[in-house]
Image: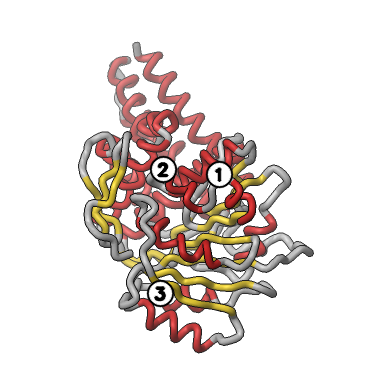
């Protein structure tokens, strides 16, 4: 029996190492300039916003400082009295040379409040190329160039995962461990193997293509717009591609409750929209191979200390090396943060199978396999 446990532990560690090797090859270090391109079409950038966040001033400033000849910014709010409107107006006044506008209103086409907020922006977009981007994306100057340069002949959508940055405190570093070493790594590994999944943080669309396939309303087919986007692009016989250098999401301070709520919500969304791919997630991270390795040692009647130490080194040192190589946030606490992340992951996976509602930026959402809904009036 100990051989079965040992083989299973080794297999999981090998899969982990393969994913890290693919990510090392596929990802460019943070700050790498976008590939130079000659075709620079006009672009509309639709940004759904709600409330003032820790880095609102910074992310707004970056949006108005893009190195792209022709682009328009469309800020979408569900409520005209949202306090972020004043901040946006100040940024617009400071950059009159950039075409920008604010649109208010709540178009209920789905149970997804962010998608509802984007509808008016999509309809108002003047250009064929449209980027749907979250308000907390820290756009580099060559943001548009990164996205456009990743478009290929078979592309249906270009995306970027969020790269956690500027963490303040241990729990923010734990969120970095979730976003960078785990989620981004596996998403890029999947894309490299032909399993490209959309990520809603930054999505570049060719507007005529999506309009011909049902328009932005087609993204209401799933509770998560990125899941609907993935399935739509696949139906069109095209692929989801990712930029080589993910865009930053500055985190600031986080606490365990926030991480648990966010990761549980995302896990529930993955479980509902892609159950076949979600089910094996219970095998990811350092806990499964560590558990199997300890069981193998105990079954063989030897001390589990040395096998456990070896498994921890094999599981986490290469991931730490990936963070160093790609210029991601690294600190003395990151190793502990990765271990805490992996201890949380089985509980989050189990939580995703249990019913109940979630809070998302002021909205109570029920996410189910058959249907999903907003349980209270949306204000974002």
Does residue 213 lie above or below 324 as drawn? above
Q: Quadrant of the C terminus?
A: bottom left
Label 3 secondary element: helix
Which is more toward the observer, 327 or 26?
26
User: Residue visible at 37% across and 68% down?
Assistant: 105
The percent coordinates of residue 357 (x first, y second) are 22, 47
Image-based side of 37 in relation to 285, left or right = right
User: Residue 131 shows which numbered tag?
Assistant: none
- Which comes sooner in the sequence, label 3 or label 1? 3
Q: Quadrant of the N terminus?
A: top left
Residue placed furthest toward the right:
38
Judge by depth and name the residue closer to the eye, 17 or 22. 22
Q: Give the image quarter of residue 348.
A: top left
Callout 1: few (<14), some (14-19), or many (20+) C-alpha neighbours within 10 Å? Answer: many
Q: Quadrant of residue 42?
A: bottom right
Disc 3 + disc 1, Cβ < 8 Å: no
Residue located at (33% from left, 71% from top)? 79
Q: Which residue is mark 2?
A: 222
Q: Is residue 34 above or below residue 300?
A: below
- Mark 3 Cα within 10 Å, few/some/many (few <14, many 20+)? many
- Residue sitting at x 32%, y 75%: 82
Q: Nearer the viewer, mark 3 or mark 1?
A: 3
Relative to residue 78, is residue 256 drawn left or right?
Answer: left
- Residue 21 visible at all: no
> Is residue 13 something one can see in this rendering?
yes
- x, y percentage for residue 95? 55, 85
Which dot, 2 or 3, sits closer to the camera? 2
First along the sequence among labels 2 and 1: 1
Image position of 200 with respect to 136: above or below: above
Please tell me the numbered disc located at residue 56. Answer: 3
Residues at marks 2 and 1, CA–CA distance in whole angstroms: 22 Å
Disc 1 marks which residue?
A: 188
């Amino acid at each position: 029996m100990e051989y079965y446990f040992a083989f299973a532990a080794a297999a999981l560690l090998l899969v982990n190492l393969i994913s890290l090797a693919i990510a090392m090859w596929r990802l460019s270090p943070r700050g790498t300039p976008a590939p130079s391109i000659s075709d620079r079409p006009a672009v509309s950038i639709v940004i759904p916003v709600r409330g003032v966040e820790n880095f609102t001033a910074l992310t707004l400033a970056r949006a108005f400082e893009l190195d792209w000849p022709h682009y328009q910014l469309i800020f979408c709010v569900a409520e005209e009295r949202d306090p972020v409107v004043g901040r946006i107006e100040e940024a617009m006044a400071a950059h009159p040379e950039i075409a920008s506008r604010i649109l208010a209103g709540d178009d209920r086409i789905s149970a997804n409040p962010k998608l509802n907020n984007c509808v008016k922006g999509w309809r108002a977009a003047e250009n064929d190329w449209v980027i749907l981007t979250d308000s907390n994306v820290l756009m580099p100057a060559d943001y548009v160039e990164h996205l456009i340069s990743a478009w290929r002949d078979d592309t249906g959508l270009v995306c970027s995962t969020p790269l956690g940055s500027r963490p303040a405190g241990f729990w923010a570093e734990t969120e970095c461990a979730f976003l960078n070493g785990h989620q981004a790594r596996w998403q890029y590994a999947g894309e490299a193997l032909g399993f490209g999944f959309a990520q809603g943080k930054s999505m570049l669309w060719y507007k005529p293509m999506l309009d011909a396939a049902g328009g932005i309303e087609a993204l209401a087919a799933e509770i998560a717009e990125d899941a609907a986007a993935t399935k739509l692009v696949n139906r069109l016989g095209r692929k989801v591609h990712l930029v080589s250098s993910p865009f930053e999401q500055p985190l600031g301070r986080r606490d365990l409750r926030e991480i648990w709520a966010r990761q549980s919500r995302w896990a529930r969304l993955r479980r509902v929209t892609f159950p076949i791919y979600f089910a094996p997630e219970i095998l990811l991270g350092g806990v499964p191979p560590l558990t199997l390795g300890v069981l193998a040692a105990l079954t063989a009647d030897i001390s589990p200390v040395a096998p456990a130490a070896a498994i921890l080194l094999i599981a986490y040192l290469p991931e730490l090396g990936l963070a160093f190589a790609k210029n991601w946030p690294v600190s003395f606490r990151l190793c502990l943060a990765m271990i805490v992340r992996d201890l949380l992951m089985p509980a989050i996976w189990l939580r995703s199978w249990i019913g109940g509602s979630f809070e998302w930026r002021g909205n109570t959402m029920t996410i189910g396999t058959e249907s999903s809904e907003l349980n209270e009036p949306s204000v974002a």
